[in-house]
Image: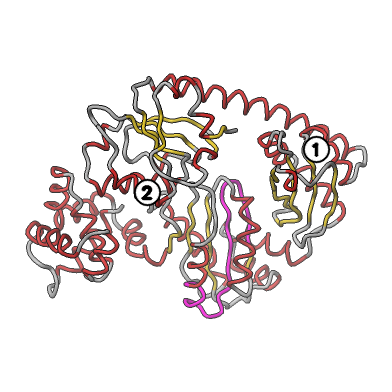
Amino acid sequence: MSILLGAALEYQSLKSADPLVLNDVPGALSRPVRWVHSSEVLDIAPLLSGGELLLSGGQALAGVTSERQADYVRELAARGIAALALETGPALPEIPAGMLTIAEAAGLPVIELRQVVPFVGVMQEINSLLVSESVEHLQHADQASHAMAAELAHGGGLDQLLAVLSERTGAGARLVSPSGLTLGAAGETSAMDDGGSVTTVDVPVRGVLAARLELHVPDDGDGGLARVAGERSVDILGLALLQRMPPGLKELAGIELMRAINSGSQQWQLQQLGPASGFPVLGKVAAVVIRSTGAGHLRPAVDALLRECVPHSASYANNAELIALAALDDGAVTRRALTVALQGLEVPAGSVVAVGPLGAGIDQAPWSLAEARRALELVPAGHGVVDADTLAVELLAHEALDPATREGFVQRQLGAVVEHDRLKKSELMRTLTVWLDTGCNTAQAARELHLERQSLHHRLQRIFELCGGDPRGTGRLAALHLATRLARL
């Protein structure tokens, strides 16, 4: 469950801090807050899942460079948190203007807490309300799903099931096919016209999207209850749909193919299931992995994207992971286009996406899937779409070299640079990594690091002094590049 950010700022425990929103992010006060959390750790972003109001005393931020402050707010924005609230005082007299500008560009509201308040009190007051509301909604949602199950057991159709759901939630309910055909409806379904909202829940049948449930919540209705009850009713509606519209043989073959790829089945099984689901045995393929709390809900959008990019595809949602296989007529060209298209896919905060390497046939689909999963383990959350091909060196080293060997190599090549960063809180290692990844292109590296070219030259000069001279034109360049990539592990 959640409350709006504007409402959270009015609770006495937080209001006593005299909060002030410092940057202009559209709709900031209408953002839902699903939890309040406090931390002074700058690397907290990977531990957040989105929707948090993050409280911080600012001590850690005050002692780092402006580049690290910028990275901090970018990382939090990428996780989709509701807002960052910073306490100003002796450690952090004011919030840096550059940090506010970057946060605003990234869509992250920053709130100044101008008075000292105990963060534990804020969390206790607001989080206890959120937990109580969540428990109440779950209880009502379970009651609704049980009533729908009883209606289905007595022979009720879709209209009757939706009538039960509508009565229990106070929202109009409509079930729509993927093509837009209304399969059943109950209650008032014009909430949007009257200032209400619509909550949409996907209803799969045997892993294939069969319909979408629309819950039209009036302006004075409970959207949180409608969403939870809708999610709890998916299995009941799926059973009702299965009675009247079983999936076709090609869809079932696609589901079984993905299950076989996921479990690493023998080649003869893949060679049978591939053609039955539209994949030629010798055609080039690549796997896609999406890990997200909303994996099942993402499947319709992913399937639509795949249909636009590739001639054949299949997908399968399992717990918090969505896996897909794409047929690639033009091999690497189509794979690059698919990777670019996935970068535009809207996913919940905290989701991670990876594209596996090119497989020469359906037999190599399990390998492509395994490599995509391994790639996800090597990058931090919020990294965007991960291309396993760009991590080939890291994947090989992770598999073939033990951690001590990797660490020793990095220490021998770049130990002085690592130590300089540790003592001076500098970013020489990151600078060198970006410069090498761009092919020693100083202009491009400066753009990616948001530095003036002269500043980058100064950093590079210092790096060369620490690691034994300019590596260009020598055999050391490859070793240094390998060391920077191994350091990521």
Residue at point 51% right, 24% down?
126
Answer few, some or many: residues within 10 Å of disc 1's Cα (few below 14, many 20 plus, some between 14 and 19): many
Distance between the alpha carbons at the discs numbered 1 and 2: 41 Å
Q: Amino acid at mark 2?
A: Arg
Q: Is residue 336 above or below residue 54?
A: below
Q: Percent position (x, y) of residue 249?
A: 77, 65
Q: Amino acid at mark 1?
A: Leu
Answer few, some or many: residues within 10 Å of disc 2's Cα (few below 14, many 20 plus, some between 14 and 19): many
Which mark, by number, is residue 165?
Answer: 1
Label located before the other in sequence (1 or 2) = 2
Disc 1 to disc 2: CB gap under 8 Å: no
Residue at point 67% right, 25% down?
136
Q: Is residue 225 above or below residue 184?
A: above
Task: Please state the extent of the stretch shown in magenta in the rendering.
Answer: 315-336
Q: Foreground: 184 or 195?
A: 195
User: Does the segment drawn in magenta span residue 364?
Assistant: no
Q: Foreground: 250 or 208?
A: 208
Q: Nearer the viewer, mark 1 or mark 2?
A: 2
Would residue 120 be found to the left or right of residue 251 on screen? left
Q: Percent position (x, y) of residue 181?
A: 82, 59
Q: Which residue is mark 2?
A: 74
**Mark 1: secondary structure:** helix
